Image: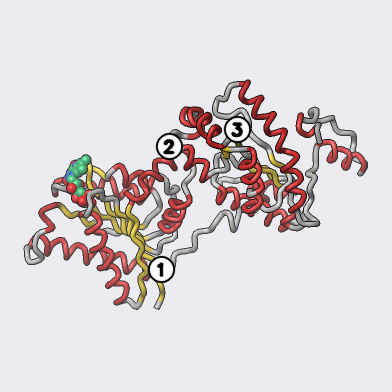
Amino acid sequence: MAEQAAYYGDGFFHNNIFWPGFHVKRMVGLYRRRYEHYGHGPADQAIVGLGGQVFMRPNSQDAIREFRPYFDNAPVYGGGPSLEEYADTTPLTVGSPQQVIERTLGFREFAGDYQRQLFLMDHAGLPLKTVLEQIEMLGEIVPVMRREFDAVRPAGVPGDPPTHVSLKAGREGAGAPPLPDGPPPTLVEATR
Amino acid sequence: MTDRSLVVVTAGLSQPSTTRLLGDRLASATERALRERGEEPRTEVIEVRDHAQDLVNHLLTGFPPEGLQKTIDAVVGADGLIAVTPIFSASYSGLFKLFFDVIEHEALSGVPVLIGATGGTARHSLALEHAVRPLFTYLGGNVMRTAVYAASEDWGASEAPADAGLAERISRAAGELAAAMSGSRRAPVPDRFEDPIPFEELLRPRTLEG
Ligand SMILES: Cc1cc2nc3c(=O)[nH]c(=O)nc-3n(C[C@H](O)[C@H](O)[C@H](O)COP(=O)(O)O)c2cc1C
């Protein structure tokens, strides 16, 4: 998939939830190198997106205590490693909002400067009410993360990934026949 | 002198382990035989029990913890492999199989492999031929003709005829492994992350000829 995205010069999104960082690093590294190889631009300017999954409470110990039964019983985590081990080896972050900010900013260390971060919020069978609270909390830290990512991103690395709207405008501006509209912007995109 | 990496995978559970003892004896005999051929062995011993938890987690989660990945890399990158298991219920032990279950099909392509086992009874020695050998053939290994089985009675004093028999088998098997390791350079295993199959090639229509 990384090779295919690089070949066409498309962006590359890695799920980054069920894999350790060293694997994500190999996949993103391959995509970036091959993007450059196919002449779409320098490796560090390729468009990369990552997933992530978090559970937050103002107090990190509360987050761990509350999330543990979901972790222990959700089949997707395999039922092998403990919550602590799994959070250690994969990007799963269970803790305070500040810990989520720091961990997420740390993804740059294995993926390079990247453009899109998608969080999985309704994982592990969390009830709707809890998921909505989590989204509220995410909404509070997203602006902080945007600011921090913008501050560390080197000049020349794009900060605004292409969207359906921008790609459509570009294609139509270059004389291509009109393309259909994409889906409406998501909640978070709409708040940009 | 060429460096040759020799990896021993041993799945004994007792401490000290009889299987480890067999693995060590096979390794030192192989090292000796390699040196006689002007090769310099670099030996690494992997105790599967040290990775037991990680192996189970790998199977349950679908990805290896980092330490286990390094161990797997050492095995598939070896110039020669010695794989020894205790016989449990007339076959390789479950832990031994678990380790090789997370090694990909053909990952041992062309790797010379010496197989050995320990057991309480000599009656189960053919488990090496009907269970262990096909496993390594499946993984692509070049399995040495002589497999070494050591039952409890083989571990007598070194003067005893039974132990002499074991010593003789160990040195024959080690000679075969050393010859296979030094005879040919193994084609380097392509790292698909460093060296991916180009997308044009994946798009190319396949014919019966490939
Ligand atoms: C659960 C279990 C099953 C065993 N089954 C057999 C068997 O079927 N045949 C046999 O010859 N020995 C059998 N043994 C004996 C072991 O193969 C033998 O003691 C071996 O040398 C132990 O290796 P270790 O010292 O490296 O742990 C069994 C041992 C255990 C613990």
Asked if the residue at label 3 sits under 8 Å from ligand 1, the reply is no
Residue B168 falls in which quadrant of the image?
bottom left
- Give how far apart the Cα atoms at labels 2 and 1 are: 41 Å
Tags 2 and 3 on a common chain: yes
Which label sits on residue A80? 2
Q: Is residue B181 above or below residue B60?
A: below
Callout 2–callout 3 Cβ contact below 8 Å: no
Q: Is residue A170 above or below residue B153?
A: above
Question: Could you tell me if residue A178 is visible in this image?
Answer: yes
- Give how far apart the Cα atoms at labels 1 and 3 are: 60 Å
Question: Could you tell me if residue A30 is visible in this image?
Answer: no
Eye-nearest disc, 2 or 3: 3
Residue drawn where x is 38% and y is 44% of the image = B53
The chain letter under disc 2 is A
**Label 2 Cα crowd, 10 Å radius (few <14 / some 14-19 / many 20+):** some
Under tag 3, what secondary structure? loop
Q: Along the polypeptide, which appears first: circle 2 or circle 3?
A: 3
Please tell me in which quarter of the rendered image ligand 1 is found. Answer: top left
- The amino acid marked with disc number 3 is Arg
Q: Quadrant of the N terminus of chain B?
A: bottom left
The chain letter under disc 3 is A
Q: Disc 3 designates what residue?
A: A57
Residue A10 position in % (x across, y down):
74, 45
- Give how far apart the Cα atoms at labels 2 and 3 are: 25 Å
Which label sits on residue B184? 1
Residue drawn where x is 72% and y is 56% of the image = A43
Q: Is residue B134 above or below residue B112?
A: above
Under tag 1, what secondary structure? loop
Residue B82 position in % (x across, y down):
31, 59
- The amino acid marked with disc number 2 is Gly
Under tag 2, what secondary structure? loop
